[in-house]
Amino acid sequence: MSDPKPPAQGADVGKFLREPPPQSDSSARTREADARTDEGRIPARTSFVTLAVRDMPAMTRFYRQFDWPESKFSDESFVAFQTGGAVLGLFPATNYEKEFGAPPAPGAFKGFVLSINLEDAARVDAAYQTMKRFDDIRVLGEPKDLSFGGRGFDFLDPEGNAWEVIWAEGTSFDERGGLIFP
């Protein structure tokens, strides 16, 4: 039996994530794979991203400009927005310092880039026209064609979290708007 293939475009990704991995020929398995049970499988998903923020009111105002659906559990100490397949949460950085240490200095790159993937190049250009009017956004240039096939631009939120708005050739979306990357 061959190795399992990633889901095809338009596939039921939710079903793929819920099902146990296909069994392969026992002679081809490694010892480590033999020891692993279905219960030990780590689902292939990122479901919640929390930004540890210094200024909760300012960051809440900023992200509300996107007009994303907001959780009914949002309040002055926690805000969550539903996005296509994942949730973006805002939570005061002080709540994480004991466990993870102080956040990077204001203006420092945090070591990750969040992405808003779109359906085509025209949507990237339209998002740019809308977002450049947002309060407290730092757009880092106009949309440009990308070397790997696609189009995009970058921006920073008020606390310096790096984002890209991008269309990449060959990508598609499931019924919830979750990205399917080739």
Image: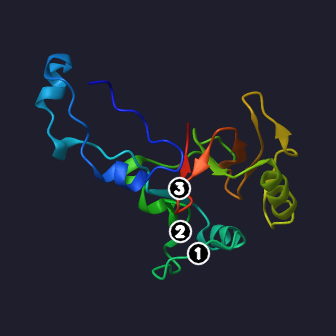
Question: Helix or strand or loop: what does disc 1 sit on?
Answer: loop
Mark 1 to mark 2 CA distance (whole Å)? 5 Å
- Which of the image's four quarters has the C terminus? top right
Q: Position of residue 65 (x, y in %)?
A: 72, 72
Q: Residues within 10 Å of mark 1 (few under 14, many from 20)?
A: few
Q: Could you tell me if the residues under marks 1 and 2 are in contact, i.e. CB atoms within 8 Å? A: yes
Q: Which mark is residue 82?
A: 2
Seen from this angle, which residue lies furthest left? 35
Earlier in the chain: of badge 3 and badge 1, it is: 1
User: CA–CA distance between discs 2 and 3?
Assistant: 15 Å
| Label placed on residue 94 | none
Q: In percent of the image, x 64 and y 38: which residue is there?
A: 170
Q: Quadrant of the N terminus?
A: top left
Label 3 secondary element: loop
Identify the coloring: rainbow
Residue indicated by mark 1: 69
Circle 3: residue type: Asp
Residue 140 or 151: which is nearer the viewer?
151
Q: Residues within 10 Å of mark 2 (few under 14, many from 20)?
A: some
Residue 174, position as x, y percentages in the image? 53, 56
Residue at the (81%, 67%) spot, across then down = 135
Q: Amino acid at mark 1?
A: Pro
> Are the residues flagged by discs 3 and 1 in contact, CB closer than 8 Å?
no
Mark 2 and mark 3 residues within 8 Å of each other at the beta carbon: no
What's under tag 2, amino acid-wise?
Gln
Rendered residue at 55%/41% (across/down): 181
Q: Earlier in the sequence, mark 2 or mark 3?
A: 2
Dot 3 corresponds to which residue?
174
